[in-house]
Each structure stands twice: as structure tokens, then as C-alpha cells.
Amino acid sequence: MLSTNPYFNFAGNTGEAMNFYKSVFGGEFTLYQQFKGMPGCENMAPAEQEMFMHISLTTPKGLVFMATDALESMGHKLTFGNNAYVCIHTENEAETDKLFDGLSAGGKIEMPVNKTFWGAYCGMCTDKFGVQWMLTYTYPQN
């Protein structure tokens, strides 16, 4: 395992929330992607295209907060209690599969592990105790 990070879901106000966290913790936005860069975004409402598919805030001490706008138009229903994940960055696909299979046993698979268009091998599940997990291996950049 390389690292773990909190991953937050917000109801359309990710930018506001992450700027708030930046004001509290300091740091810089090290990665961000709006939905307008995503394949199929042309079918989304213009306002939703401006929302965040992903944003990372790296604090001066190296803690990374990550977040997304959970869009109902994409089948997400955000309620308090499902607005955070533990995101585990793995070292390879095999480790991702092993951890995902273990954590999802007896739980619920939200997104099966698969190769993504953003260059990662990623899956999301809720374990049998209600904890939400995101497991991701980022392929090396050539």
C-alpha cells in the first residue's frame, strides 16, 4: 500500500468546500478535473460540466484531501453518511484486486475494479460494516 486519503463527495459545492479546507489547512490544489473533460460530457447539463469530477488538495505537511461532485444525473444520491471514502493507493493491480475482493466480501460493490479513462485501475465498494472504500492503482506515466 502506498498511501491512504480521505475522499469526499459533495452535492455540487466541491469547489467551495475544497477552498474552505485550503483556507484552514493551507496547501495547493495539485490535481483537478472538471466533468467537461470527461468522455460523454457533451450529454451533461452545462452547469454540471463545470463541476468537479476530481480535485486534490495537498497540505504543507503532505496530507492529501480529495473530492468530487456527486451528481444525481449520474445516478449518485448523496446523503450524510455516504459522503466520504477511505481511498487506498495501491502498488499494482494484483494488490488492488486482493484488497477490493476482501473489503467487498459481504458488502456492496459500487464500481467494480476496472481500467479507467484517467489512467488508473480503480474500484469502489462499501464493506459489510458500512465503510466506503476506493482502491486505486495509478499506471506509471510514460
Image (tube, rainbow, N blue to C red):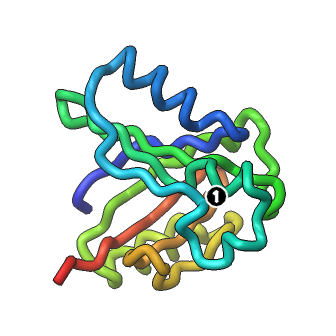
Is residue 93 in view from this perspective? yes
Closer to us: 139 or 108: 139
Query: Which quarter of the figure has residue 9?
Result: top right
Would you call the spot at circle 1 few (<14 residues within 10 Å), some (14-19), or many (20 or more)? Answer: many
Name the image quarter holding the N terminus. bottom left
4 relative to 39 in the view: left or right: left
Q: Is residue 123 above or below residue 75?
A: below
Q: Between residue 32 and residue 90, name the one nearer to us.
A: 32
Q: Is residue 131 visible?
A: no
- Quadrant in the rendering for residue 74: bottom right
Q: Position of residue 7 (x, y in %)?
A: 49, 45
Mark 1 lies on a secondary structure that is strand
Q: Label 1 amino acid?
A: Thr
| Spot occupied by residue 126 in the image (x, y as percentages of width and height) | 64, 58
Image-based side of 3 in relation to 48, left or right: left
Q: Position of residue 6 (x, y in %)?
A: 44, 41
Q: Is residue 140 above or below residue 126?
A: below
Q: How many marks?
A: 1
48 left or right, relative to 63: right
- Residue in front for this viewpoint, 104 or 13: 13
Residue at the spot x=35%, y=51% of the render? 31
Q: Is residue 76 above or below residue 12?
A: below
Which quarter of the figure is the C terminus placed in? Answer: bottom left
Residue picked out by circle 1: 126
> Where does residue 23 sit, x and y in percent of width and height?
38, 17
Residue at left offset 82%, top offset 54%: 72
